[in-house]
Image (cartoon, rainbow, N blue to C red):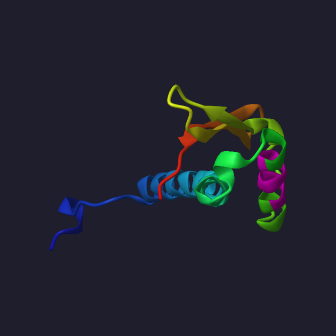
Amino acid sequence: MNSKHQSGATMWSWLTILVMVGFLGMQAFQVVPIYFEHRVVRAALQDVVDSREFAEMTNKSIMRSISSRMTINNVRSIDSKAFKAMRDRTGDKYILVKYDVKVPIMSNLSAVVEFNEEIRKTR
């Protein structure tokens, strides 16, 4: 084979690709834990909503139960104001979860992940 006619990626193109993959990997390491933490939060809230006494619980006792579950699961980054016990038109209770998490990317650039969902009884 003649080396003048060979084609392929040069050192600079490989370096560019590695830098881009490294940057995206670094961002994934910052954002993915936020989604794992939200899964823990959602599971804890679902346990509260699915409990037998949820329909008779007061808002204060619901918030106390949520707070204790957040402490047990070591979730400290979410304010208790992010959770609200609500009722729909039929009178069924549910918990509204609304919060956002800001992750610094570099310098003054940040990523914001917003969560807004209703946790309703499944059983």
Out of 50 and 39, give the one closest to the viewer.
Answer: 50
Residue 49 magenta-drawn?
Answer: no
Question: Residue 30: image x %, image y %?
Answer: 67, 53
**Residue at horizontal 77 percent and vertical 31 percent from the top:** 108
Viewed as shown, does residue 109 lie left or right of 117? Answer: right
Q: How many dots with numbers?
A: 0
Viewed as shown, does residue 30 lie left or right of 79? Answer: left
Viewer can see residue 75:
no
User: Relative to 56, does residue 114 appear above or below in the rendering?
Assistant: above
Question: Residue 58: image x %, image y %?
Answer: 78, 42
The image quadrant of residue 86 is top right
Q: Residue furthest front?
A: 56
Q: Main secondary structure of the magenta part?
A: helix
Image quadrant where one finds the N terminus: bottom left
Residue span colored magenta: 62-68
Out of 1 and 71, give the one closest to the viewer.
Answer: 71
**Residue at horizontal 61 percent and vertical 54 percent from the top:** 42
The image quadrant of residue 112 is top right
Viewer can see residue 60:
yes
Q: Residue furthest top?
A: 89
Q: Residue furthest bottom?
A: 1
Question: Residue 19: image x %, image y %?
Answer: 55, 54
**Residue at horizontal 56 percent and vertical 39 percent from the top:** 118
Out of 50 and 52, give the one closest to the viewer.
Answer: 52
